[in-house]
Image (cartoon, helix red, strand yellow):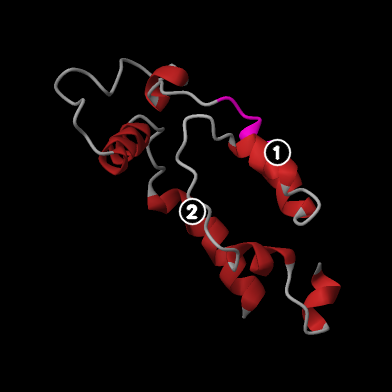
């Protein structure tokens, strides 16, 4: 793939991105079948898609999935956007992490680094 880029040929990713968008919204559409059908044209991307699509999906809030405490999404927070829910989960992780050491504890290490650079 990399060698083709230097020769003026499109990479597999470029070819895929320039494809006409197929708008098949039928209930019988299967993304895995689409990739299976298009594997000869996009072998590397098809392998990547197979790896990603093989992962089971989950609608469980990540807090519940990783058992970091009570559920973040409850009746009062059910209308949160995914971005806000993610921010809440990150904030909770930050608040529950170990406290920072006082800066004074790092003075010796900083001096050694500075002396090594100068």
Foreground of the two, 107 or 53: 53
Which image quadrant for residue 64? top left
Q: Secondary structure at mark 2?
A: helix
- Image coords of residue 33 (percent x, y): 67, 36
Q: First in sequence: mark 2 or mark 1?
A: 1
Q: In the rendered view, would you say 64 is above or below 8?
A: above
What is the quadrant of residue 59 in the picture?
A: top left
Q: Splitting the image into 4 quarters, where does residue 116 fall?
A: bottom right
Question: Residue 112 at x, y = what percent?
Answer: 60, 64
Q: Which residue is painted at 67% across and 67% down in the image?
A: 15
Q: Could you tell whether 20 is left or right of 88 in the image?
A: right
Instruction: Categorize mark 2 by other alpha carbons within 10 Å: few (<14), some (14-19), many (20+).
Output: few
Q: Which mark is residue 50?
A: 1
Camera-nearest residue between 19 and 75: 19
Q: Where does the N terminus fall, quadrant-wise?
A: bottom right
Q: Which residue is located at x 70 percent, y 37 percent?
A: 51
> Residue at label 2?
106
| Residue found 49% across the figure and 44% down from its top | 24
Residue 68 placement (x, y as % from top left): 40, 20
- The residues colored magenta run 50-56
Looking at the image, which residue sits at the far left?
Answer: 76
């Amino acid at each position: 793939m990399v060698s083709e880029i230097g020769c003026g040929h499109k990479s597999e990713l470029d070819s895929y991105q320039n494809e006409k968008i197929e708008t098949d919204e039928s209930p019988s559409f299967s993304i895995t079948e689409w990739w299976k059908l298009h594997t000869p044209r996009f072998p590397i991307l098809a392998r990547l898609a197979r790896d990603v699509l093989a992962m089971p999906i989950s609608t469980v809030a990540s807090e519940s999935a990783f058992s970091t405490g009570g559920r973040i999404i409850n009746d009062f927070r059910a209308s949160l956007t995914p971005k806000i829910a993610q921010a809440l989960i990150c904030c909770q992780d930050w608040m529950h992490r170990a406290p920072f050491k006082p800066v004074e504890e790092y003075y010796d290490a900083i001096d050694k680094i500075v002396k090594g650079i100068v």
